[in-house]
Amino acid sequence: MSIHAQYQNVCVACDGAIRYGDLIDKDPFTEKWMHATCPEDKPREVCLECFMEKAANGACGC
Ligand SMILES: [Zn+2]
Ligand SMILES: [Zn+2]
């Protein structure tokens, strides 16, 4: 059963952040929380000029 997160947490499945309001499930074996659907975001590309992560659209503010 999925519920909306009441506080921030870390997903045991993907190690990603669970934010308030995210839909999450409890792992029945570990009783820890995970995303109902883990985000499939790949790590963002890093700008070779400033070494900051680029925005989702690939642009960099530098
Ligand atoms: Zn996850
Ligand atoms: Zn940059």
Image: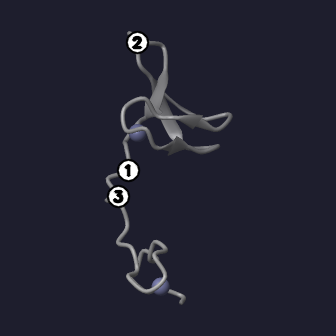
At a point 43% along the width and 12% down the height, the residue shown is 30
Q: Are the residues flagged by discs 1 and 3 in contact, CB closer than 8 Å?
A: yes
**The residue tagged with tag 2: helix, strand or loop?**
loop
At a point 45% along the width and 76% down the height, the residue shown is 51
Identify the residue position indicated by label 3 in the image. Answer: 41
User: Could you say which disc has been placed on residue 18 in the image?
Assistant: none
The amino acid marked with disc number 1 is Pro
Label total for image? 3
Using the image as rendered, state which of residue 42 and residue 47 is in the foreground.
47
Mark 1 close to ligand 1, CB under 8 Å: yes
When the figure is inspected, residue 15 is found, relative to residue 28, above or below; the finding is below
Using the image as rendered, state which of residue 47 and residue 25 is in the foreground.
47
Q: Going by the picture, which residue comes out furthest to the top?
A: 29
Q: Picture quarter containing residue 25?
A: top left
Q: Quadrant of ligand 1?
A: top left
Identify the residue position indicated by label 1 in the image. Answer: 39
Q: Residue 61 location in percent, x, y?
A: 54, 88
The amino acid marked with disc number 3 is Asp
Question: How far is disc 1 from disc 3 in space, using C-alphas?
Answer: 6 Å
In the rendered image, the quadrant that contains the N terminus is: top left
Question: How far is disc 1 from disc 2 in space, using C-alphas?
Answer: 20 Å
